[in-house]
Image: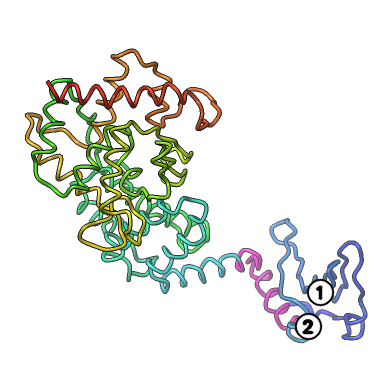
């Protein structure tokens, strides 16, 4: 290589003051220092290769002394002489280093990083569910594997063990795919082992929840009292129908949400599917049931209306209601708790209550138009009348 006459001296570099725009101090052979407006001084190397002008950063001054920078400059010039690009080699070195990191960081460690850095904007419930899936189904299989060693076969094994619940299986696959997509964006890995498995999970057709006819509803209502269960379980089943609430909204309710004197229940937005606060106007029958429950659970430290009778500090499990209703013998084997909402909604619509009122009772939102958030007062009178009608009509049906 041709010898380079370097010209910069420490005094020249040290006295170089920052300006409004970056400027350079040339040392020789394409090596120069760029003085930035911030006052930082950076060694760079400009060169021509294959008819193109390229530039590569060597390091900052004084961390890279004049001698260090010139030694590195000679190495980079040798690459150019051989027809190799120092800039591309630096990029390749970064990729290789990150691939090496991928070989050392475990899937579990990176997944925890992904949860922290990407799920902070999601709801607490969504994050908790995602972490539960990872801890229960993913970490036991690939948690200790190096991120770069995870193969599609490993992911397939996880999915196949969850095919009894196809929705959960596909969502777990998507979580793994999202983690690897994030790793790709971070240049930690180059491929995603979950992507080739799209379509492996065939989801079962959506099965709509069975609604009850009026005769079936009468039989169900009478059978609930005869089934034999804890008083709070029976109360929860009845209140599901009388409030038209979802299980998660009711079973995690706390006493401070209720004003039994005013006969209202204010469900906070965080527990609602649509993330909007929801007000339930309680019928006299619902208030009576809640007074009975309050005598049993009103003093429990957790504040839950329906605390678990098996474990302290937690609410009644969804499974408790599922199993209870499955045991109720009233001639309909496939009825589930969610079917109560549809049963109540159908009954109200058949007896003249408007669709907008019923949708408000169900805490639904319109999907085909932009609408303002429902206020507590919207159709308050009709909603109150509808839930009282529902309770009175069920009593009439049960009385024969």
Q: Residue at x 39, y 28 (%)?
A: 361
Magenta span includes 77:
yes
User: Foreground: 110 or 355?
Assistant: 355
Q: Is residue 256 above or below residue 280?
A: below
Question: Disc number at residue 77?
Answer: none
User: Foreground: 292 or 39?
Assistant: 292
Marks 2,1: beta carbons within 8 A: yes
* 211 horizontally vs 176: left or right: left
Which residue bears the numbered disc 2?
62
User: Foreground: 137 or 176?
Assistant: 137
Q: Quadrant of the C terminus?
A: top left
* 19 horizontally vs 108: left or right: right
**Other residues around mark 2 within 10 Å, as few (<14) / some (14–19) / many (≥20):** some
The magenta stretch is 69-90
Q: What element carries label 1?
A: strand
Q: Is residue 61 above or below residue 124?
A: below
Q: Residue at x 30, y 59 (%)?
A: 314
Main SS of the magenta part reads helix
Q: Earlier in the sequence, mark 2 or mark 1?
A: 1
Quarter of the view holding residue 358: top left
* 122 horizontally vs 390: left or right: right
Which residue bears the numbered disc 1?
41
Q: Is mark 2 on a helix, strand or loop?
A: loop
Q: Which colour scheme is used?
A: rainbow
Q: Position of residue 311 (x, y in %)?
A: 24, 62
Q: Residue at x 30, y 46 (%)?
A: 170
Q: Where is residue 89 in the image (x, y as percent from the top left)?
A: 60, 67
Magenta span includes 367:
no
């Amino acid at each position: 290589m041709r010898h380079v006459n370097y010209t910069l001296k420490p005094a020249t570099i040290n006295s170089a003051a920052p300006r409004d725009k970056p400027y350079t101090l040339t040392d020789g052979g394409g090596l120069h220092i760029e003085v930035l407006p911030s006052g930082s001084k950076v060694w760079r190397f400009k060169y021509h290769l294959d008819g193109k002008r390229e530039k590569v950063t060597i390091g900052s001054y004084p961390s890279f002394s004049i001698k260090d920078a010139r030694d590195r400059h000679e190495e980079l010039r040798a690459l150019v002489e051989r027809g190799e690009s120092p800039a591309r080699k630096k990029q390749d070195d970064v990729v290789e280093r990150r691939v090496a990191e991928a070989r050392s960081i475990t899937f579990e460690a990176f997944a925890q990083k992904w949860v922290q850095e990407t799920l902070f904007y999601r709801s607490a419930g969504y994050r908790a569910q995602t972490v539960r899936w990872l801890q229960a189904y993913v970490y036991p299989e690939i948690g200790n594997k190096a991120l770069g060693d995870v193969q599609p076969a490993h992911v397939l094994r996880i999915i196949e063990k969850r095919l009894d619940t196809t929705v959960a299986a596909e969502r777990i696959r998507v979580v793994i795919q999202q983690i690897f997509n994030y790793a790709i964006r971070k240049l930690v890995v180059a491929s995603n082992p979950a992507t080739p498995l799209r379509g492996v999970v065939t989801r079962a057709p959506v099965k709509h929840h069975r609604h009850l006819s009026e005769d079936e509803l009468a039989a169900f209502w009478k059978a609930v009292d005869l089934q034999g269960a804890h008083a709070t379980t029976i109360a929860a089943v009845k209140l599901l129908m009388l409030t038209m609430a979802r299980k998660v909204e009711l079973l995690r309710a706390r006493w401070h949400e209720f004003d039994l004197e005013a006969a209202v229940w204010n469900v906070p937005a965080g527990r609602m599917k649509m993330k909007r606060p929801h007000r339930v106007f309680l019928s006299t029958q619902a208030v009576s049931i809640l007074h009975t429950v309050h005598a049993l659970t009103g003093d429990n430290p957790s504040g839950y209306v329906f605390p678990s009778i098996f474990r302290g500090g937690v609410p009644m499990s969804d499974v408790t209601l599922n199993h209870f209703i499955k045991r109720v013998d009233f001639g309909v084997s496939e009825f589930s708790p969610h079917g109560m909402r549809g049963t109540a909604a159908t009954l109200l619509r058949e007896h003249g209550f408007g669709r907008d009122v019923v949708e408000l009772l169900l805490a639904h939102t319109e999907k085909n138009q932009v609408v303002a958030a429902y206020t507590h007062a919207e159709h308050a009178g009709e909603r109150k009348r509808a839930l009282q009608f529902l309770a009175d009509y069920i009593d009439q049906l049960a009385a024969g």
